[in-house]
Image: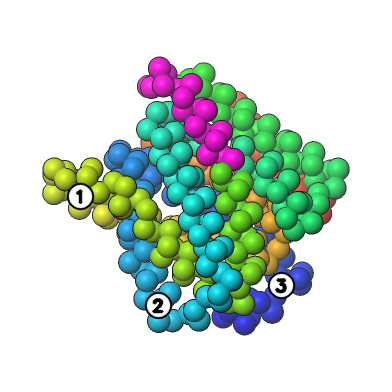
Amino acid sequence: MADWLVGLEGTAEGARLAYGLALAAAMLHAVFGALQKGRHDPWLSRAAIDASYGVIAAPFALFVVPWPEPWMWPIFAAVFGIHVCYKLLQAMAYSRGAYTVVYPVVRGTAPLFTVIGAGILFQEHFNAVQWIGVLVLVGGIYGLALYNLRHAILGRETLGAALFLAVCTGGFVALYTTVDAYGIRATANPFTFLAWFFLIDSIFMPIVTFRRWWGLPRDQVVSLMQRGGLGACVAFASFGGIMLATRLGNVGQAAVLRETSTVFSALIGWLMLGEATGPRRVALMAMIAGGAAIVQLAA
């Protein structure tokens, strides 16, 4: 499997697979965000998810994939630190603001800085038409956030802090996207990076939330762990998919496609969380999808 994937690097087939992985990651990332927000404390939800995917990743990291090359350990240390900051900021944002307000701001901030970062780190540059597509997509995402902000009822007193934290979170999304892409390209076997990433990434949140678990009713713990198991499966497909996409194809294009997750999050908010929708939100979602299409067609 690893040899087949590596063999697709730099080919048209590899680029098409990267785009498919990025779109699948977009849909699954919206599901992942909803699972973390949901009805539970977002700190505990994230801890349950992380613990679950750490348990699943451990045997693969230790006994299945080749061990990381020596130069990978500093990269893993950087990845760990960046993802810790991202998780803390995201949990604080979700604790203070409505999912359909916070999530679009996070995702709208990320692609612009990711494209810039990919240009600096990987010398991958967009043409003028592609930049127009990025601006259309980002404009649609922020438009959706503003629309949701106007109609938000709960938690308005903390929305200012939530929006600030969401912008900071988006900056760290861009940072981890580029650094993760560097990491998965630095090792011979991409599945070595993925297995060790999930194992190392699983450590922090269960430790930092340890005291919060004491005193929880048993049925709530069971519900959280069930959500954690489901979230772990989604995380493997979503985060793993986008990382593979950045190895096979253009990092900036994969990042832009992933941000169509905002469209899927709006659909989840409507279908699963009972949040209202309407023609303006549909138009903004079409704008997001249109921006992503421009980026791909102009490549």
Label 1 CA crowd tier, 10 Å (few <14, some 14–19, many 20+): some
What residue is at 53 percent from the left and 44 percent from the top? 264
The location of residue 116, given as percent across then percent down, is 73, 45
Of residues 63 and 142, which is closer to you in this image?
Answer: 63
Q: Which residue is mark 2?
A: 62
The location of residue 117, given as percent across then percent down, is 70, 49
- Report if residue 168 lies within the magenta region: yes
Q: Which quadrant: the C terminus? A: bottom right
The numbered dot on residue 9 is: 3
Q: Answer above or below: position of 101 versus 179.
A: above
Which amino acid, mark 2? Answer: Leu
Residue 280 seen anywhere in this rendered image of the structure: yes
SS label for mark 3: loop
Residue 232 seen anywhere in this rendered image of the structure: no
- Lower position in the chain sequence, tag 1 or tag 2: 2
The location of residue 87, given as percent across then percent down, is 44, 45
Magenta part mainly helix, strand or loop?
helix
- Spatial CA distance of label 1 from label 3 is 43 Å
Which amino acid, mark 1? Answer: Val
Foreground mark, 3 or 2, reads 2
Is residue 76 left or right of 285 when viewed as pictured?
Answer: left
